[in-house]
Amino acid sequence: METTFDFDDDEPSPVAQLAAIAEAKTALAREESAAVRHARLHGMSWAEIGLLLGVSKQALHKRFGKMG
């Protein structure tokens, strides 16, 4: 299937915008993982980290539990 995109030159390309968002999400996930690891190494509980990130301790433990 071939698709042709017609973009206004005054606006950013939706393809470029979406690619930038995907890249930012990947970078943010890496930062989050490092921050959670750092917090756990400094004695923070899953509940404390979850409160700061706005997620449940169960969700955090499920995602990052292997790190300690």
Image: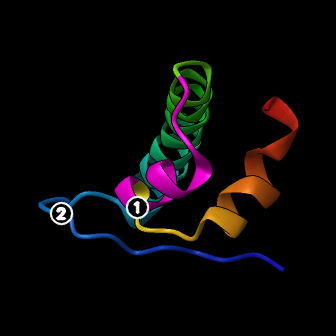
Q: Position of residue 18 (x, y in %)?
A: 47, 60
N-term-proximal mark, 1 vs 2: 2
Judge the density around disc 1: few (<14), some (14-19), many (≥20) Cα neighbours within 10 Å.
Answer: few
In terms of depth relative to the viewer, which is nearer, 63 or 2? 63
Q: Point out which mark residue 11 bears.
A: 2
Residue at 41% across, 57% down: 53
Residue at 81% across, 45% down: 65
State the extent of the magenta-drawn residues as a range: 43-52
Q: Position of residue 33 (x, y in %)?
A: 61, 35
Residue at 60% across, 29% down: 40
Q: Position of residue 66 (x, y in %)?
A: 88, 38
**The stretch drawn in magenta includes residue 29:** no
User: Quarter-wise, where is residue 68 in the image?
Assistant: top right
Identify residue type, mark 1: Leu
- Foreground tag (1 vs 2): 1
Q: Which residue is mark 1?
A: 51
